[in-house]
Image (cartoon, rainbow, N blue to C red):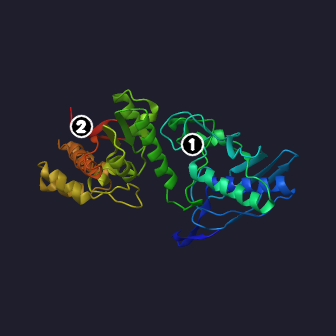
Amino acid sequence: MTSDPESQGGKPLRRGWTTGACATAAAKAAFEALLTGRFPDPVEITLPKGQRPGFALAKTARSETEAMAGIVKDAGDDPDVTHLALVQATVRRLAPGSGVRFRAGEGVGTVTRPGLPIPPGEPAINPVPRQMMRDAIAEVAARCGATADVEITVSIPNGAEIAKQTWNPRLGIEGGLSILGTTGIVNPYSCSAWIASIHRGIDVIRAAGLDHAAACTGSTSEAAVAKRYALPDFAYIDMGDFAGGVLKYLRHHPIKRLTLAGGFGKISKLAEGALDLHSGRSQVSLDALGAGAASLGADAAAVAAIQSANTAMEALEIARQRGLPLGDWVAKKARDVAEAEVDGAVDIELLIFDRAGATVGHAGFDAV
């Protein structure tokens, strides 16, 4: 395992492997065992950028007609819900000319909605992992003098339960997890899987022809938006801290209207131009909130109190006690930042909620 140049607490972070890389290694080992009777352990694969990592086998089985290999996924130091999941591939030979076919086994989902990289009815095995498996099968076939015609069934025991912690149910991927990865490598805390899920969520919304969606920072804001609008479940984008991941994608893949919602602190950061709203990567500017209150008519004492507040919510409460619509002021600034980021391609409404789900700031759609 290689070390990531970034660190946490001074300790280098380890990179990990995607489910796609693990499935590829398992399929390669299983096919070689089917042809030769021997499982290579460790099994080496080629990643899309040319790296050649080796994977230890955790489980094997073989009969006259098929072979199975399993690999425990190591996500390194990334907080990945599939870390330590067992990724298995069962390989069965097909008639010459059949090519490589893919099946979803236990714990691997099936696509049911359009808009994803794989069409409805297909196993949720993304294009890059499919190509990695085809290449690995071709490599073994050439070395062993066989044809590269096989059926690969990928399974992840307990995958259906793990999938409940992912976007898959909302995206219309039923029955389990997706086999993902574009490089084969998981970079710790890159959150690339989350951002990719945001993009796929937008793709599904567009494919369904919806003209209104909501991007929310968390469950409280999503529940509050749901009380306002009767949107289908897949119209909600679990944005988390990644406002930029939503807005930059919408610039080139627009929908007509977006309700963007969150708490006062995170939206205050967006109002100042931050597109990553994580507390470790952006901070609330109390000076900016004080200046906003001043523009709304706050006296010097109120401005000073806001600028010395302990939290953004305390600053908001100080403004509310003085009858100052600071929440609306922040909402409008944040909406302006968001609309600039999408370059006018999307009409955006901004909603701010407190921890109880009450509205504390609002900037409406431009088009009524």
Of 295 and 269, which appears nearest the observer?
269
Disc 1 to disc 2, C-alpha distance: 32 Å
Which residue appears at 43% of the width and 48% of the height?
A: 240
Say if residue 345 shows up in the picture. yes
Disc 2 residue crowd, few under 14, some 14–19, many 20+, Cα 10 Å: some
Closer-to-camera residue (357/120)? 120
* The N terminus sits in image quarter: bottom right
The mark closer to the camera, 1 or 2, is 2
Few, some or many C-alpha atoms within 10 Å of disc 1 (few <14, some 14-19, many ≥20)?
few
On-image quarter of the C terminus: top left
Whole-percent x, y for residue 348 in the image: 28, 41
Q: Which mark is residue 365?
A: 2
Q: Residue at x 28, y 59 (%)?
A: 285
Considering every residue shown, the one lying at the far top of the view is: 230
Q: Is residue 199 left or right of residue 267?
A: right
**In the rendering, at what x and y percent does residue 275 appear?**
35, 55
Query: In the image, residue 73 lies at what x, y percent?
Result: 67, 55
Q: Secondary structure at mark 2?
A: loop
Residue that carries the numbered disc 1 in the rendered image:
165
The kind of residue on which mark 1 rests is: Gln
Dot 1 or dot 2: first in sequence order is 1
Above or below, 29 against 126 in this view is: below
